[in-house]
Image (spheres, rainbow, N blue to C red):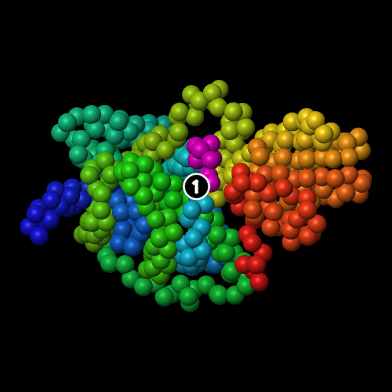
Amino acid sequence: MTEFISKRLPNVKNDILSGITVALALVPEAVAFAFVAGVDPLVGLYAAFMVGLITSIFGGRPGMISGATGALAVVMVSLVSQGNSMGDAGENLGLYYLFATVILMGFFQIMAGVLKLGKFVRLIPHSVMMGFVNGLAIVIFLSQLGMFTKTIDGDKVWLQGTDLYLMGGLVALTMFIMLGLPKIKLTQKWPEALLGILVVSAIAIFFKLDVATVGSFIRDGGGEGLKGGLPSLHLETFAKIPFNCQTLKFIVPYALILAAIGLIESLMTLNLIDDLTETRGNGNKECIAQGSANIVTGLFGGMGGCAMIGQSIINIKSGGRTRLSGIVAAVTLLIFIVFGSSYIERVPIAALVGVMFMVVIGTFAWSSFRILNKIPKTDVFVLVLVSALTVIFDLAIAVFAGVIVSALVFSWENAVRIRARKHTKEDGTKVYEIWGPLFFGSISAFNDKFDIKNDPAHVEIDFIESRVSDHSAIEAVSNIVEKYVKAGKTVRLKHLSQECKQLLYKSNTKFKKLIINAIDDPRYHVVENPEKFN
């Protein structure tokens, strides 16, 4: 037992230190993403704590960090804005619609896990993933441009003159610190985002610079400042918004989109961590844990969340490997919320914008420019399409569209690959040797291979180098046979799989006389056995 514990002490140490490091990195991004969504920073901090804690304990990928993310925040902007317009000025109804949507989003994610839909993330092509991250980076960048404005007599105007130079200078300084300091040995174990914020905040406070801060931003938006404390149950959500068909019509589309985005980003992050650690996580378990976490965070006043690519990589590279690292990160973050909220208020907005610009730089797949002339044009089209749709609509629509286009391209390319080699035996029998996949997309090309009118009296169709892939293909084979029979000719089928033969036998018992059985018949499945549904 002593040996067992001693072997794991280094891992415990690494997990604790890594968790503390991640917690420090979570604070600025949680606040920044809350600004992106247009809600109080505490809403983002509570989400980072609750989602991070629950998924760390019950999730399907030890070492993966979850919290408030930009991918979800950019969708929430419209939700909160439309929700606010449904109530009176100052009622802040959009926030309560957000909480209700996050709860419903959680239920959808649990359903995805129960139905074992997590495995379908493996069907996302690499070009779609690159478009996904590029689009996300562009959306986050555009969302930060609003921070370069100020309100004058109720109207937002762009910063000019000294205000613009001061804002731009502090943003650039934050980015420079994040780029340069990690190269210094003394600071390599500190999160560069935290270092940039601390230095810029110290400069702004010491020189008493007249710049917007987290506190002033909240107060300008009608808030009362950042009051830290333990999250409490927000039962007023159920009293503030009417639960009727109109409300469901409003929040269900957002809940579906947020659920899809959260699962896609989380499962993509899970696959990435699997590759880095050479282990395997459980996608369906992660779906259920994430859904449960979002239900809880919606009930307790959080903006919801999902896996965070950047923080997860920080955790893994810092030595975090088990659930302990995520738990430590969440608990440490709660300590910051309870005891450090007054300090968070003094952080300049420029520092957070600088952090977000670095998130944009780190998120964007710059290698996509290098490989544009090295990959198929269809993949280039999908990459650009997904990036554009992400900016115009949202990540879920973009990814679904990218997958559909990729699937159609794949189907078309395989549809034109089917071939038929023809030769005649000594006895006069004409043989069609089918090569390539036979499925719904290649049926037309398959039918064109046969010359039923001019073929001899005896025909043989050999599928040894083909694969009958679906029910449409089975029907195509059956139709070809029927045409030969009507023409008064004899046709034989060779090298069909056992399942193909069974399905043809059930459609017409005459096939038992037409199909040649051989020991080298292939073995593969076509469709589910209909008897299973009886």
Residue farthest to the front, as pictured: 427
Left or right of 157 in this view: 415 = right
- Quadrant assignment, res 435: top right
- Quadrant assignment, res 186: top left
Left or right of 34 in this view: 488 = right
Residue farthest to the left, as pictured: 2
Query: Can residue 126 be found in the magenta stretch?
Result: yes
Towards the viewer: 125 or 308 = 125
Query: Can residue 343 be found in the magenta stretch?
Result: no
Relative image position of residue 306 (x, y in whole percent): 41, 54
Relative image position of residue 252 (x, y in whole percent): 57, 64
Towards the viewer: 523 or 317 = 523
Kind of residue sitting beneath label 1: Arg
Say above or below: 186 vs 149. above
Left or right of 318 in this view: 93 = right
Label 1: which secondary element: helix
Pick the quarter of the image with the C terminus.
Answer: bottom right
Relative image position of residue 513 (x, y in whole percent): 78, 53
**Residue corresponding to mark 1:** 122
Q: Residues within 10 Å of mark 1 (few under 14, many from 20)?
A: few
Left or right of 476 in this view: 406 = left
The stretch in magenta equals 123-130
- Name the residue rendered at 40%, 70% in the picture: 299
Towards the viewer: 121 or 495 = 495
Relative image position of residue 436 (x, y in whole percent): 67, 37
